[in-house]
Every structure is written in C-alpha cells, then in structure tokens.
Image: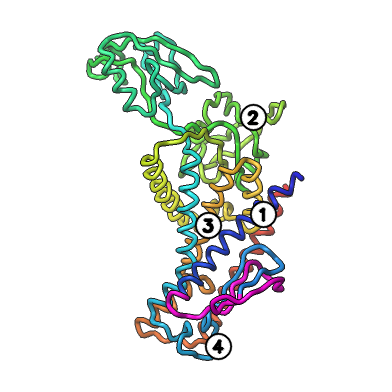
Amino acid sequence: MDYLLPTIAILAVLALVIIIHEAGHMAAAKLCGVPVSDFSVGFGPSLVSWMWRGTRYHISAFPVGGYVKVVGMEPDEPLTPNSFKVRPWWQKALILAAGSLGNFILAVALIFVLAFIGFPRQAVLVQAVIPGGPAAEAGFEPGDVVSAVNGRRVKDQFSLRRAILSAQGREMTIVLERRGATLEKRVTPRSFDYVDEQGKTVPYNEGRPSIGVLHAIVAMVLPRVQIVMPNSEAAKAGIKPGDVIVAVNDYPLRLGSDLYYLVRWDEGAPEPLNVQLRRGDALMTVRIASGTTISSLGILFATELERLPFFQTVVRALQAVYATTLAFIQGLGQLATKEGLELVSGPVGIGAIIAQSARSGIYTLIQIAMVITLNLGLINLLPIPALDGGRIVFVALGLVGIRISEQKEALAHTVGLVFLLSLIVLITFRDLLGILR
C-alpha cells in the first residue's frame, strides 16, 4: 500500500500533462481544418476505440501519456486538400505550438487551484534588534516572527509601521512566534540613540519614534523537508523527505528559508555545512559540501498556508505564473554548467519527485504537476529537431525562402530523436544510481 498512492500519482500526473499537450495539437489542427486521424490515451496496443467526428479515439495498453496523428505531418503521407503540408505557415506554426500552449493553460489552471487552496503565509521576520531600543529591552531576538500588534494580525511590514506610528508613544502589545512558542511583549515606541558603524552615537530612525528592529516580509517556510531533488547536494548528503532541520553549523534554524541565507546563488556556501536534523525520534548530523548553491542544494521545504480574499488570490496567482515562467527561463542558462546538468531529471527522477510530492499532500502534488507541465511546454519549444520548436524552425526557414526537402527534414528529426532518447537513457541511468545510492 505504501507504493500504491505514489504509483497512481506518477501515472496520473504524467498522463495528464502529456494528454493535455497532445490535445492542444489536436484542437489547433481541427480549428485550422486539418483532419486528425487518431488520438490515444496511452501507448501500445489499442484496448478500446471509437470513432467521433472524424477521429478515432483509443485507450491503449500503457497508460502513461498519449499521442495524436495529424494528417499530413509524416513525409510519406499523400497530399490532400486539407493536410498539414499544404496549410499556410501560420497554421502550421499554430498547430505545432499548440501542444505547449495547452501545457501553459494547464499550468495557469493548476496555479489557480493552488491559489484557492491557499498561499504560503507571509509574515514579518525580525532580522536585527537595535541595541538600546525598546525591542532590545523587551527581549526581541533576530528570527522572531511578528504575528500581531494590539490584537490585530500583522501581514506585512507596512501594517507594522502603521501600528508603530499610530501608537504615538503609547504602549503596544506585540505577539511574537519564536521556534514554535508564542510570546507576548509590551513595548513603547520612542526616540533613542545608537552607535553607528563609524562608532558615532546618532539618533536612530532620524529621531522618529521606533521600537528598534530591522524587519522583512518572508514566507513562512517550515524547516520540514518535503522534496529532495535527485542528484542534488541534499540527496548526496542523505537528507530525506520528512526530515526536520534543527540547526546548521550549530546555528538554530527557525524557518526552513534560513538555510538559504547560508548559501549563495553564484559561489555557494563558503564552507561545508554541518546540518543537524531530526528524523522521527532520532537526531543526526549530515554534511553538505562547500560551494553548494541554492540551486544545487535541491530542497523544497513545507510552507504554512493561508486563504486570501478573491481579488488578492487572482493577483497572487498571476504573479506566481510570471515568477515560475521567469525562473524556468533563467534556469535554462544553467544547463550549460556542470551544476545545471546534474540537476536535470529524466523519467525516473521525475517519477521520484512526484512520488515524494504525493506523500507530502495534495498541495505539493499539484505544485509539482504545475512545474512539470510548464517545463514540458517550454522544453518542447526549444529549437531542437524532433521537438515542436525544431519543427517550427523548419516552417520559419521555408517562410524566408530556404526550402529543405521532406527527406532531409525527416532525417534531421530522426537524428534529433536519437540524440534526445540517448540523453534520456543516460540521465535515467544516472538517476537510478542516485536513487540506489
């Protein structure tokens, strides 16, 4: 039973993203008047089939993915008045790009599903406490989360500033969250002096009343590991989903995101990280190599979720679409580096990630499905023969007058397919070694 849910999740996610991709091709082809002879859910022998509106639909033996046959796309097919080969260039490009468009639409739909389940809760994190100020005297500590002021929840740094200004020197009751405990502090904003970096005593906050903290808006990222990317530095160190990170180099971890502050995007951690973690009832220490960056670390932490009003939900969802797409595009540049290539996953690695997410809960599973469908859509647009993007390149070449015979184009796609399959085999072999290790 432990493997039933992950197996169902793997089949469902992969089938969904691939079927949506193929359905995009079919919808665009029919919109342009190009016949679609077959559409199959799954591969291999057809178990059940039926005819509907000129297309034979199949349920095939192997349920992962599917395929669509658009009339006129193969080089040896005879010409017909409505076949793909005789359509205008823009219709060809639309049909080829529509699979990725379907993946993008699915990604947006899944992001909105996530949005209405909840967003990672945002909170105000105390980054530093100014000596001599009211907060320091009241016992504030770096890493405290400000959750409420005078009985009203603090959602961002602006609401905290407004509360301090409106206090006008009166005592404030501030509720803090500190490593799982809830603390109540009473402070009175006032003007005070502090010693700056040059050793001079100057008015803090230009002499305006303050409680004396530096703060930032953060997502409530819990220190519990949800996903460990195959072949990442975390996987090599032996970190597993469900582990709770307690401390790093003897520095207590308050939020999972605290670990990200100890590594850098470019050069990575300047020294090895000794990570103390709790696995069940056992405490253990693992070592992460120096030079580990946020990308090569390969950890997705659990987040605390909250529901937002409808309008805010829509805005945050659209922001998530933009941020996820931008992150993928930026990540393409890392494929040229050794670190980036090590983090590329094949079918086995992707299956392992889906299995981990299924065990973590529906939110994480939908989140991973969203990332996979978006990545599939973007990857298929890369200008590589055998991919949709490679076929679009040949359409563009014909548009500018560069005519390439069908046989040469078919050869290029065959070579591209062999290259991609070989790459998948190598990555799958590496993923298997990583999982076994």
User: Residues under labels 2 and 3: Cα distance?
Assistant: 33 Å
The residue sitting at the right extreme is 1
Q: Main secondary structure of the magenta part?
A: strand
Label 1: few (<14), some (14–19) or many (≥20) C-alpha neighbours in 10 Å:
many
Q: At 69% from the left edge and 71% from the top edge, which residue is drawn? A: 48
In which quadrant of the rendered view does residue 224 lie?
Answer: top right
Label 3: few (<14), some (14–19) or many (≥20) C-alpha neighbours in 10 Å:
many
- The reply to whether residue 172 is visible in this rendering is yes
Q: At 35% from the left edge and 81% from the top edge, which residue is drawn? A: 400
The residue beneath circle 1 is 431
Disc assigned to residue 373: 3
In the rendered image, residue 42 lying in the magenta stretch gets the answer: yes
Query: In front: mark 4 or mark 2?
Result: 4
What amino acid type should be assigned to the residue bearing mark 3?
Answer: Thr
Q: Position of residue 26 (x, y in %)?
A: 51, 72
User: Residues under labels 4 and 2: Cα distance?
Assistant: 61 Å
Which one is earlier in the sequence, the residue at label 3 or at label 4? 4
Query: In front: mark 4 or mark 1?
Result: 4
The residue beneath circle 2 is 277
What amino acid type should be assigned to the residue bearing mark 1?
Answer: Asp
The residue beneath circle 4 is 77
- The answer to whether residue 175 is above or below residue 121 is above
- The reply to whether residue 200 is visible in this rendering is no
